[in-house]
Image (tube, rainbow, N blue to C red):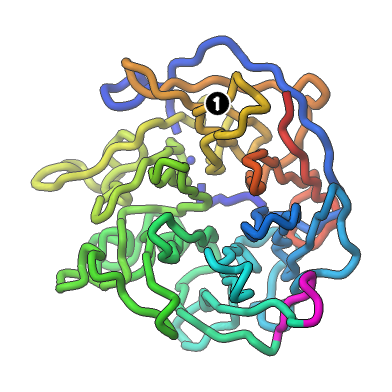
């Protein structure tokens, strides 16, 4: 799935760097194939040795002990907006299991629904469901309950990731509303604190439909209280490290791709900035503003076009990856970032048994901390060329 939402130029600037060092050579092992545009992979935190794969076309599949179960865990196609079979950024995009899933069976999905307002293109929906009381490998579609909706003015830049933070709150990534250049209003949606678009949201789903955490930055005014951080173009993938840091990969316009460590209340620049540079028409983008710089950025001149966020590797099976942030680019490249005294440094990863991955839609992580690569070889959300790989030593 090309997040043309997406973008960078090689840099060596103060707070981040694109300096590379010796390439890592690892193994990429195929787990399953025949999937329809796999765009997310996660686990339920229930020690069941299952991973759940989100197919953009509207289903969630289970892989258990390396086997793809034949019946979907969830089929939500009936609730989706129409999706082009050739290319689309809409669909079923995100999945998060409640921290107490083992006892309450609750999980959350992020999907694109038909528009509810004539002026919009479609609607983003965050919904809660529960697992069937009769079969742990089946969701109960009748339990579907809408938590949050957001009108979308265009079909692209929908974000997608939802996940629970270490604080127990649900974090939601939303893009700037689509099109190009965040053309909405005087400053764009991402800088508009009265819009939920171009933001990372944080809500408490334990108080239906949701409550606002008391320490959210705008809970007392100045912006929508759901906002945790802002200034994002399309935060396609993000994750929490075990130490609590929130890593967000934000897809750029046509020059830069960036990775941020996001903190509460931070302004991460778009559309004032793209990566480390002012974005036209904002000529004096930092005048009177405090903008958070990315920890890392790369340019499209490197033959990469769309950053795919990943995970800090905390497993012990691959010592060479320990403590590094593993991420990717849609053009089939996997990379690692490591924090050093001089800044964050990028390291390329080569797979000895696979040189052509096709398009990388997402990375995923299981409960043990293994990292997966989700790919497809043909564009479009409905073909069956999707593959899930696991990275090994």
Q: Quadrant of residue 184?
A: bottom left
Name the residue furthest top. Answer: 22
Q: Give how far across and how far down residue 30 sits, in percent.
A: 83, 38
- Name the residue rendered at 48%, 40% in the picture: 7
Horizontal relation, residue 392 to residue 146: left or right? right
| Residue 148 vertical placement versus 354 (above, below) | below
| Residue 73 vertical placement versus 282 (above, below) | below
Element marked by disc 1: loop
**139 within the magenta span:** yes
Horizontal relation, residue 104 to residue 260: left or right? right
**Residue with the mark numbered 1:** 322
Q: Give how far across and how far down residue 80 sits, in percent.
A: 66, 78
- Name the residue rendered at 59%, 65% in the picture: 97
Q: Give how far across and how far down residue 239 sits, in percent.
A: 49, 48
Return the residue nearer the eye: 142 or 76: 142
Q: Give how far across and how far down residue 256 sits, in percent.
A: 43, 36
The residue range painted magenta reads 134-141
Secondary structure that dominates the magenta span: loop
Q: Quadrant of residue 70?
A: bottom right
- Name the residue rendered at 60%, 19% in the picture: 320
Tell me if mark 1 has few (under 14), some (14-19) or many (20+) residues whose alpha carbon lies within 10 angstroms of its own: some
């Amino acid at each position: 799935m090309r997040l043309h939402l997406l973008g960078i130029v090689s840099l060596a600037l103060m707070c981040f760097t694109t300096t590379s060092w010796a390439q890592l050579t690892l193994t990429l092992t195929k787990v399953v194939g025949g999937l329809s545009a796999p765009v997310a992979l996660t686990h339920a935190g229930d020690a069941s040795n299952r991973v759940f794969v989100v197919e953009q076309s509207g289903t969630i599949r289970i892989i258990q002990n390396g086997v793809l179960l034949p019946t979907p865990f969830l089929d939500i196609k009936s609730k989706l907006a129409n999706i082009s079979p050739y290319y689309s950024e809409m669909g079923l995009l995100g999945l998060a299991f409640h921290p107490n899933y083992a006892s309450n069976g609750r999980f959350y999905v992020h999907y694109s629904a038909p528009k509810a307002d004539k002026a919009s293109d479609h609607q983003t929906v965050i919904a809660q469901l529960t697992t069937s009381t009769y079969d742990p490998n089946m969701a109960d579609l009748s339990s579907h309950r809408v938590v949050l909706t957001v009108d979308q003015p265009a079909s692209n830049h929908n974000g997608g990731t939802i996940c629970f933070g270490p604080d127990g709150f649900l974090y939601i990534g939303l893009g700037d509303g689509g099109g190009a250049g965040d053309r909405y209003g005087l400053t764009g949606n991402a800088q508009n604190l009265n819009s939920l678009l171009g933001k990372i949201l944080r809500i408490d789903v334990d108080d239906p439909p949701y409550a606002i955490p008391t320490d959210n930055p705008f809970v007392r005014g100045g912006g929508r209280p759901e906002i945790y951080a802002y200034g994002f173009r399309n935060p396609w993938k993000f994750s929490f490290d075990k130490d609590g840091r929130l890593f967000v990969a934000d897809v750029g316009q046509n020059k830069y791709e960036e990775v941020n460590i996001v903190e509460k209340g931070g302004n991460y620049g778009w559309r004032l900035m793209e990566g480390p540079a002012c974005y036209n028409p904002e000529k004096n983008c930092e005048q009177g503003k405090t903008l958070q710089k990315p920890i890392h950025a790369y340019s499209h001149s490197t033959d990469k076009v769309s950053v795919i966020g990943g995970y800090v590797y905390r497993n012990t099976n691959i010592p060479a990856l320990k403590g590094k942030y593993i991420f990717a680019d849609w053009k089939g490249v996997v990379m690692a970032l490591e924090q050093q005294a001089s800044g964050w440094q990028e390291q390329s990863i080569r797979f000895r048994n696979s040189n052509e991955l096709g398009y990388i839609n997402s990375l995923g992580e299981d409960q043990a901390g293994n990292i997966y690569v989700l790919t497809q070889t043909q564009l479009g959300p409905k073909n069956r060329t999707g593959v899930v790989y696991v990275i090994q030593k």
